[in-house]
Amino acid sequence: MLYNKVFYQGQEIENERLELTDKGSLYFLGSGLTLRNCTVVVKVSGRNLFLTGSRFIDCTFEVKQELKNHQQWVKASLKGCRIKGRLTGCDFGHWPDYGTGWEHGAIEDCDFTEARLDGCRIMGSDPATIRFPKWPCFTILDPIRRARELNSVQWPGGFRPIVVEGQYRDPPCTTAVTLYAPALAKRRETTEEAFRAVVEQFDCIVY
C-alpha cells in the first residue's frame, strides 16, 4: 500500500483541530512543531503516527480507536494536556535509553481521567503532576523502588506487577504504570475483585 505522507513540523499551531483519521496516511508531527490549545483526533494505528520532537501544550487528544504499543509518545513533550480514549502498552515521558529522539520526551500536568490505560507507563517524569484514571484502572507509583514490597504478596493468576531483572524487566526510569483490571483479570483467568483486594493493600497504588 502506498501511503500519503502528511507532515506537521517547524511551525506553531494554536486553537485548531487536527484530524489524524485517514487510514491511508502517515502522520508526522515532527521537529520544531508546537501545538497550543489544539484538539488532536487520532483514529489510526500507532504505525501511522510519528511524534518525534513535537511539543503539545494544553492540548486535548481524542483517541478514537485503541492505540496499542505506541512508544512515540516518549519522543514528544506534553504539558497540561488531556488524553481521552483507549491506550494499551503506551509509554510517556523521558526515557534516555529508548533511542533517537528521547531527548524531547517529557510529560507534566497531564490528565488521563477520561482514558482507559492498560500497561501504560510514565517514564523519567514526576507522576505527582499527572491525573490518572480511576478504577477499574489502577496506577502503581514509584514501582521500581517499591518492587520488593509489591512482589511480596500473592497477586491473582500469578501476576507479577513489576519485573526488575531479566530480559523483560521494567526500565529503571519507570515512575508509574497503569493497568486495566478487567483486561488483566481476563488475561490471568481471574476476577477484577481479586485484583481489587490486593490493590487496596498498598498506599503506592492509586485507583
Image (cartoon, helix red, strand yellow):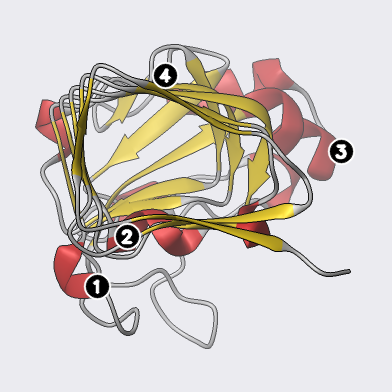
- Marks 3, 1: nearer the viewer: 1
Task: Name the kind of residue labelled 2 in the image.
Answer: Val
Q: Which residue is mark 2?
A: 74
Tag 1 or tag 3, which sits nearer the N-term?
A: 1
Label whose residue precedes the other's in the sequence (4 or 2): 2
Q: CA distance from mark 4 to mark 2?
A: 30 Å
Dot 3 amino acid type: Glu
Which residue is labeled 3 in the image? 189
Q: Position of residue 15 (x, y in %)?
A: 24, 16
At horizontal 32% and vertical 60% (from top left) the residue drawn is 74
Residue 198 lies left or right of residue 32; in this view the side is: right
Secondary element under disc 1, as helix, strand or loop, is helix
Q: Is residue 134 left or right of residue 41?
A: left
User: Could one spot residue 148 in this view of the protein?
Assistant: no
Residue 37 or residue 164, whichever sits in front? 37
The answer to whether mark 4 and mark 2 are in CB contact below 8 A is no
Q: Quadrant of the C terminus?
A: top left
In this picture, is 98 found above or below 58?
A: below
The circle on residue 102 is: 1
**In contact (CB < 8 Å): disc 1 and disc 2:** yes
Give the mark, 3 or 2, whose residue is nearer the N terminus.
2
At label 1, the amino acid type is Trp
State the separation of the CA atoms marked 3 and 1: 36 Å
Q: Residues within 10 Å of mark 3 (few under 14, many from 20)?
A: few
Q: Is residue 91 above or below residue 204?
A: below
Residue at 50 percent across and 87 percent down: it is 166
Q: Disc 4 marks which residue? A: 200
Q: Kindly indicate whether the residue at mark 2 contacts the one at mark 3 (C-beta within 8 angstroms).
A: no
Q: Is residue 190 above or below residue 136?
A: below
Foreground mark, 4 or 2, reads: 2
- Which quadrant of the view contains residue 190? top right
Please, is residue 167 above or below residue 160 in the view?
below
